[in-house]
Amino acid sequence: MSTSRKPASFWKIFAAAGLGALVVGLIVSFILMATLTSVLGGLSDEFYKAFGPPAKTKVKDNSVLKLDLNMTIKERQYASFSQMSFSLNSYVGLYDIIQAIEDAKKDPKIEGILLDVSSTKLGLANAGEIREAITDFKSSGKFVYAYGKNYTQKSYYIASVADKVMMYPTGHMEFKGLSTTVSFYKEFLDKFNLEIQVIRGSNNRFKSAVEPFLATEMSESNRLQTERFLNGLWDNMLSDISESRGIDKDQLQLIADSLLVRNGKNAVDLKLLDELVYPLDLEQMLLNASDLDDDDKPRLVHVKKYMNRKDQQFERGVSGLFPNIAIVYASGSIHGGKSDPSSIGDETLVKAIKEATEDPFIKAIVLRVNSPGGDALASDLIWDALVTAKEKKPVVVSMGDVAASGGYYISCMADKIFADPNTITGSIGVFLIIPHTGKFFENDLGIHYSRVKTAEHADMSYLTMNLNSFSRPLTEEEKKIFQQGVDETYHDFLSRVDEGRSTFNSTAEVDSIGQGRVWSGTDALEIGLVDTLGSLKDAIDYATNIAKIDNPVVGGYPRINNSGLMKFLQLLEGDQTNLMTSQEDVLPVFIENHVEQLKEIDDLGKIKASMLWRFDIE
């Protein structure tokens, strides 16, 4: 009896071809990016030699520091070439911003700050660190004005700390509460006869990173943890805004629930804003606050220029000394191999930790973590390097927006862990994802497989995954083998935390707050995952004290060799600073973020200590 096979639909063939084209395109783009970055770096070095270094900024008396937070702010300063927009970009580091604010507080030439933060890409924890630095700046008696064409909710959170919060008269502002949305792909995959085989820790019911492939909506466990930490972050925001603006928290909640803020006038009536002003009015306010004549112009110095100022008497540390505190940056997803500016490679980070450990001038290490985790093996290698470092000198952890799963794995051994109240951490749990493409290739594309093997499981791979590995489903016996490996890795994770954190008495106690569950920084302090709430600066101050350092000088690791690009970009930047800064294009940033997520595909088949693949709080 013969049967006819249903031909593949046009859209399925189109989707398969499109996926192949996308993968090839990404590979070509990455190669092109690497080549152009190398070439431009060399050219910029030659340009720098020919025309000299960029001129140092001269800060005049009665100046105002323009704190532009609309630009992309990374964990550390670096330059790169974007393969999406084919442009050179320089990024300012969070610590550099905070240090500039602290320097401006002591600088007699700086009268105050103009905070320009219409829209910011900062996470809530890093936004809170800058907000804290501005609060400290205000203790000097100098003024802080905030002005925006519009205010997103996150940008308003930062701006609310200012003495005066102002907006363009026809601008818009949002104040609506926090939300997060998770995409679920199971039905989409089913339509293409694709199956994602998921194995997670036996009791890791909160490990929600795998849910998008298993269900069409949040599980009860995931919804429970998400509501808990999201409400915690929102409560922190309301508390800070309430304190700064003198508005009761219940009133702020009512404003959000009822969407009472719909335009600038609403915001002024509700006391969220002080005034609606045009740029010329703002200019006059700055002149008055800076004690300048009406026929003058406000002397604005952009924060990027201020970092490159001529007068270095307020520069951190002591000129001429070698760094004695190492900030080791662990930013991005964790994987094996080399790091890039947006991810953590175990080889690169282990090497950096060893360099900081063996450097006789370095007296303490501050590990700055902003990572959702990733490859469990790579996380363990980094953890081991840090344990070795801790035997020789203090190791302090500072958590940024996210320090979860593998990000927490590499943090748990520290002498002391600092987290922001809005940090997302925990997620102690692991999982494994193995796709099964056989039905799609056979039924829809007409690709069939025949195998010859010398042992029962010879065609099953758990070290090197490829399309052949995905062409058949796992047998029940193989699932049990993989489950055993995942459970062993989870137990190792529990053991690392139990060993590193004196707040826990057993792996069972760690498991009770583990199982993949995510916590806010505030909750993490309560249950013993972190030691104290504080900023990167607080962590550096603590490391300075326990290492008994008189004159702290900070150095960043891993070392970045892109000085040519940075110098070249500084030469190209103009000196003029306007009242308002144009915002960056959204599309290139959006695309680059998704490209980074696509890199995760390379780690399929590896045991992961990772949080959600896609996690945004709006």
Image (cartoon, helix red, strand yellow):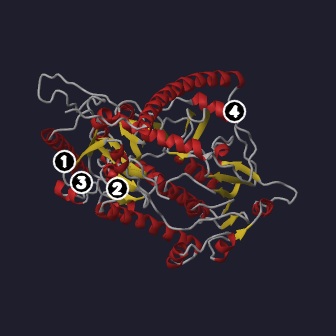
- Taking 136 as reference, is 145 left or right? right
Three-letter code, disc 4: Leu
Label 2, label 4: how far apart the Cα atoms are? 52 Å
Label 3: few (<14), some (14–19) or many (≥20) C-alpha neighbours in 10 Å: many
Q: Nearer the viewer, residue 411 or 356?
A: 411
- Taking 255 as reference, is 216 left or right? left
Identity of the residue drawn at 36% across and 66% down: 228
Label 4, label 3: how far apart the Cα atoms are? 52 Å
Label 4: few (<14), some (14–19) or many (≥20) C-alpha neighbours in 10 Å: some
Residue 464 placed where, x, y %?
27, 29
Q: Residue at label 2?
A: 216
**Quadrant location of the N terminus in the rendered image:** top left
Q: Quadrant of residue 480?
A: top left
Closer mark to the observer between disc 2 and disc 3 = 2
Closer mark to the observer between disc 4 and disc 3 = 3
Three-letter code, disc 2: Thr
Closer mark to the observer between disc 3 and disc 1 = 3
Q: Residue at label 4?
A: 571
Numbered disc 3: secondary structure: loop
Three-letter code, disc 3: Asn
Q: Residue at label 3?
A: 204
Question: Which label's residue is closer to the chain start, 4 or 3?
Answer: 3
Numbered disc 2: secondary structure: loop
Closer mark to the observer between disc 2 and disc 1 = 2
Asked if one can make out residue 327 in the rendered structure from this viewpoint, the answer is no
Q: Residue at label 1?
A: 491
Label 1, label 4: how far apart the Cα atoms are? 53 Å
Three-letter code, disc 1: His
Closer mark to the observer between disc 1 and disc 4 = 1
